Structures are given as C-alpha cells and as structure tokens.
Image: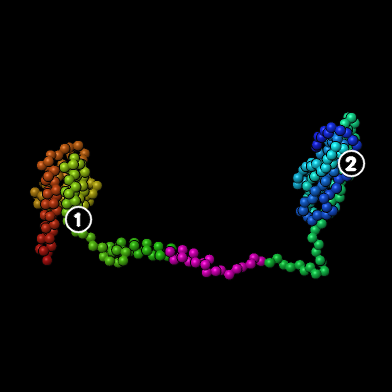
Amino acid sequence: MLIAAVLLSLPCAAQMERGATRLSRDTILIGDQIEWIIPLEMAPGEKFFLEDIDNPPAPGVEIIKPIQIDTVASNRKELKIEGRVILTSFDSGSYYLPPLIAMIEHAGGDVDTLYMDGPTLEVTTIPIDTATYVIKDIKGQIKYPVKFKEVLPWLLLALLLAALIYALVRFIKMRRENRTFLGRPIVKDPPHIVALRALDKIRKQKLWQNNKQKQFYTEVTDALRVYIADRYGIVALERPSKEMLADLKKQDIEEKLYENMEQLFSTADLVKFAKYEAGAEENEEVIPDAVRFVNATYMKEIDEEKEDK
C-alpha cells in the first residue's frame, strides 16, 4: 500500500536526478542508534508517494522513530528532501535493509516508479583480546564495616525501650505496695478528713442558693457514700439508698444520727429523681447534719480504739 509522505506543489517544472538510500555511518555497536536516510530530488510541481516501511524492516533491526521528512535545499529549479528513519539493533551481524519504492507524479500527470535499494547495516560488539583476557569468577557483595553512627540510633532506641519497661514494672510493683514510684509510702488521708474537706468545699460553692439543688444533694450524698464505704466497709457507691442505709443500720450508730442520714438521703432521692424542691430550712440543715454524722462516727471510732488499748 502506498501512502502520501510529502505533497509539494511549486510554480514551475523541471526534471531532476534521483538518489539511493544510505546510512548515516558505516557500523554501530549493539544498542546504538543510526539514521536510515532516504534522499529525493524533485522538480517543482511534482508529487511523490512513498511505500510503507514495515517494523521491523529486517529481522534483528528495530525502528525507534518512524520516517520524518525534512527539506535539505530548494530553489526555483529543484527541491532536495530527505526522509530519515532511526534504527537500532541488539545483536551483532550484517543486516540487509529492504528496498523502497517511491512513485513520482510529474506536473503533467505522468507517474514514474523509483526503486531504491536498501543499504547493509553492520552491527558490531566490543572486541575482546582473547590472548590476554582472563575469565574471573563473579565477586560477592562488598561488605563495609559497620560504623558507630549507624548503630547509635538503634542503641538509643534499645535503651529507651529498656527504660520504659523498667518504669512500667516498677510503677506496677509500687502501686501494689501502696508506694510512690520512688518507693515512699503513700499516705492516704483518713476517711473523715476526706469527707469533711469535701463537705466544706460543697458549702463554699453555695449550690442550692444558686438554684442547683440537684447538684448540691448529689455531691453531698456522694461524699457521705465514700465516707461510709471507707469507714464501715459497706458497698455504698452506686447502690440504692435504701440498700445502703439497711447495711448502715446494722452498724453501731446512734439512732438520732441514723434517722438524720435516712432523712437526708430520702430528701436527696426526691430532689434527684422526683423533681422535688426542698425548702431553705431543709437545705440549710444538710451540711451540718452530714458534718455531725462524720464527726460523731469518727469520735466513736477513736473511743473504741482507746477502750481496746
């Protein structure tokens, strides 16, 4: 099949000689590239059509870049153009490139067929002097000595990991022994001190005076529950008030103190769960009743210890 490679039309007409294809140099090394040059001389007003070039053009030869047409020289009487194809080969030897066929259409309409022989491509390898060449075994990987700066980051990481493991083990051990991380005994405030401190803080907040009754009763009863749990060993946290008070009644507590606590927790449950609005007099007695309960039960504990001695 013939394709139009270049279409030229010049104002005047003349007859010109045609050339043959050639290579940009005689030989190449394996993998190098070379130009296959297709020169054409045409008269003004002529057209030419060039046959397709197969890829590969010959066994062992590959086209890297297809034909490109460039104008080499031109004047009023003649036009010289060149087609250039970039080739390569990856095996040594002689390769005969195929002939090309071009059709020239003259200005008068006549058509001539032009046969262009293909050149011979010589592909060579790097010569080896077999007289002095000695085949050597493949060398293994080069082992470079390990430098300290390469080991330092890993050493620091190992030390850090060891320090973290030691700190974690020591922390768990000290917590079990009720000691600080440095080994000092953890001094826990007595239950009555913790309760009185919490009640005093609640009093200073003036919660019920600022229409925060629910928060007020919640914090007071929570402080008392913590005290009762630590003082008597009763499960007081997160239990219904009636169940906790039932266990508290079994302790050696004055009846008046118990009744005050029963009334306080009953009012607190109404405020927290039934939207009950306690009066000012009720609210004013909550902190004093809670403080009296803590102090009385604590003093009773001291008296019992004295009697035991």
Q: Which x, y percent locates residue 131?
A: 82, 69
In this rendering, is residue 243 above or below 138? above
In this rendering, is residue 49 above or below 172? above
Q: Residue furthest top?
A: 109
Q: Residue at x 20, y 41 (%)?
A: 212
Q: Which x, y percent locates residue 300?
A: 11, 57
Q: Main secondary structure of the magenta part?
A: helix
In the picture of the structure, the residue carrying the numbered disc 2 is: 18
Q: Is residue 276 visible?
A: yes
Q: Residue at x 82, y 57 (%)?
A: 124
- From the viewer's perspective, tell me whether residue 160 is left or right of residue 132: left
Q: Amino acid at mark 1?
A: Val
What's the magenta region? 140-160
In this rendering, is residue 286 above or below 182? above
Label at residue 194: 1
Q: Quadrant of the C terminus?
A: bottom left
Q: Is residue 262 visible?
A: no
Q: Which x, y percent locates residue 140?
A: 66, 66
Q: Amino acid at mark 2?
A: Arg
